[in-house]
Image (tube, rainbow, N blue to C red):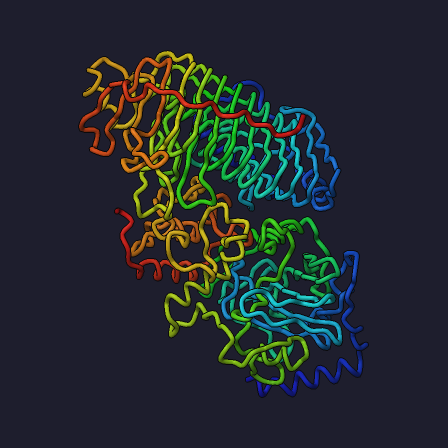
Amino acid sequence: MRRIAKPFALLAALLLGACAREPAPVRFFAEGMPAKLSEWSVLVSDGQRLGLNSGVQPYDLNTPLFSDYAHKLRTVWMPPGVSAKYDADNAFDFPVGTIISKTFYYPRPDDGGAADRVQRSDPAASSFTDGALDLRRTRLIETRLLVRRQDGWIALPYVWDADQRDATLTRIGALIPLQLVDAAGAAEEVAYQVPDQNQCASCHNTDNLARVLQPIGLKARHLNREFDYASGRADQLATLASAGYLTGLPPAQQRPRAADARDMGADLTARARAYLDINCGHCHSAKGAANTSGLFLDVAHEPGIHFGFCKQPVAAGKGTGNRLYDIKPGDAAGSVLLYRLESTDPAVMMPELGRSVAHREGAALIGQWIDAQQGDCNR
Amino acid sequence: MRQCIPVFAIALVLGACGESSNGPPAPAADASYAPKLQQQLLDAKPGDVIEIPAGRYAFDRSLTLRANGVTIRGAGMDKSVLSFKGQKAGAEGLLVNGDNFTIENLTIEDSKGDGLKISESKQITIRGVKVQWTGGPSTKNGAYGLYPVKTSNVLIEDCVAIAASDAGIYVGQSRDVIVRRSRAESNVAGIEIENTINADVYDNVATNNTGGILVFNMPALSQQGGQIRVFKNRIVANNTGNFGAKGTPVASVPAGSGMVINSNDDVEIFDNDIADNATANIIVSSVYSTGYKDSSMADGFDPYPERIYIYGNRLKGGGDSPDGLDLKALRVASMGLTGHFPDVLWDGYYNKNRTIDGQPASGPQICLEDVSGVINADGPNGYDNPNTDIGPFRCSLPKLPAIDLGRG
């Protein structure tokens, strides 16, 4: 399929080159907040097709954060002559000028319909094919930029205009009503939340005292996988290194790798840990905003009381769901953790931001993992 | 369409309760102000004062402030009202992560989760702020009204908290705290000081809560609390049925608890008026009585309350109708069919291996003066051998220092 499509993409590119202006090169704004996403020239849209500008590298994560079943197109760009430094555990150290983008989109249902009707499908699946998204079959929601400036990262949320040619800076965020339509045609309402700029920090201030934004996904363990580039499938970290974007990359066998939570062939605990790490670990860590709970779900912590085992909730309020322990080994239905993953009440659900429906498949994984744990809280 | 939803919700509530509210209905909240305040919170810089004019304002998402040195000031506690009824996103009304923060003279209402949460920040002032859930006590209400956590140098004064499903005013894992001249009513816990070091709680009123004022220490958190003084408060008739969600620490607090000290060391309770709390005016207990097992405790956690000094309080009534089958049975068994518990109920858990300066301690140093009596409930043995001998409690302790926030 891809082999057949490729010549057409090439043809399209040729036609674009012949008929349309070349996009301006990516522009890093050292200050200010451009009102339109197009001013950065990271993504290029003509309303039919969303592509990447020259030098913009796409990437995926082994296990992504769940965001109301939105799919994500992630990219990173750096100015010429600078590169990120590899780190085995933390987000890479990115140079000033780095622009990270994350575009949230949904495939449209096969039967089309109103623009607010979007597909419920595997959010880790990508519609990014041959270097582009086909916008005739895609509803773009928002693109978040994380930009590394001299004095640190800044987060900028852009909401896509109705014609999908450009997106508009929306610092105060928005609630976007959507209908999530499953394969059988059943619809569920989504109050999709574009975070306001301060809420970006609710996840990206991974150290609640340092109070500076950090990338979350751009860590070795999340990036250590292959990607379907327009030029073919290849290792992401090696590709970033050969593009000059990453230095200090150790040999492949020394790079940590988070599991793909969807991979039924992988170890159950590894899948669950990867899921909890990317969905919860940026707050539920020793320095994250949720450290007030004493519950730490990042990879740095091993299962035990601070991982929730037999740990009684402290400030959960009705978030306990009348359950006594965060994780009651062997009893998912008796565990607060699963209750909060399955809830859609803003006062109960976890994560607190970024979703209005439950991730059924993710909750099922965590439930299966808790049921497989052993231990006795009644001693 | 979106504007229709709150109206529909109100209709449902009214239909369900079949009650008419007192006084004229609150005017419809204005949704057009939300973007302006959000923008001000995003743009806030040290030294900024964000003035919220008189009015009722509707929000469908939580608010977040992340700058230092900001003041948010309303036109008066009942004049500037931020209503979160119909909130669709966000786990609190207002979330703050910033030092030198002041919020005053406004009301936060009907947030889905906590009303005002301030985390990991220092130099905090909350003055003349009301947080309430307007439908009255309900498990569906947000957990905490005022919720500074992992904060230091905190002043809460002249505030009001009503109908929180956990604690109305809750200070957690903090250091150097004053809570004064505030009122907590119809919450599960009126005022709760948890895992906090150095706090003075005075001139407050706690009434109609499940428990009036709680000084708690919970396992598996960043620090253990201590050095807490509770004085000159009115802790009266906290007899509201417990509406906390099972699994939360306060869900195990019996209705009718006046002053509760749970697993906290170094607490001084004096000069309070404590009356008519139907389980007991004063309870001293261990987390073992609130459902904790050893498997739920991190290494090094001390589950026993020690060095508790209770004196000079004016106590009246109470103890006549304890909550829960165990305590009801205990009252009848130990005090007779028509008897009531004395002023102080101790669950009887203590560390038998504790030493002081290398010598075996004679007990937990729970020192009582000016009380009608005490009952040791013998919790460790399933309430088998309660006794009311006050002898072991006749002691005194050095008084704790006053908290000085250094604000002149």
Image position of A281 with respect to A226: above or below: above
Q: x, y percentage for residue B159?
A: 58, 25
Q: x, y percentage for residue A218?
A: 59, 67
Image position of A95 with respect to B187: above or below: below
Q: x, y percentage for residue B126?
A: 61, 30
Q: x, y percentage for residue B319?
A: 31, 18
Q: Nearer the viewer, residue B19 or A211?
A: A211
Is residue B28 shown to the viewer in this render?
Answer: no
Q: Residue at x 38, y 52 (%)?
A: A305
Q: Is residue A116 left or right of residue A28?
A: left
Quadrant of res B115: top right
Q: Nearer the viewer, residue B342 or B166?
A: B342
Q: Nearer the viewer, residue A207 or A342?
A: A207
Residue reaching furthest to the front: B358
Is residue B38 shown to the viewer in this render?
Answer: yes
Quadrant that contains the N terminus of chain A: bottom right
Q: Residue at x 78, y 74 (%)?
A: A23
Q: Is residue A210 left or right of residue A278?
A: right
Quadrant of res A267: bottom left
Q: Is residue B313 left or right of residue A331?
A: right
Q: Nearer the viewer, residue B274 or A98?
A: B274
Q: Residue at x 21, y 29 (%)?
A: B383
Quadrant of res B280: top left
Count of numbered marks: 0
Q: Residue at x 34, y 37 (%)?
A: B358
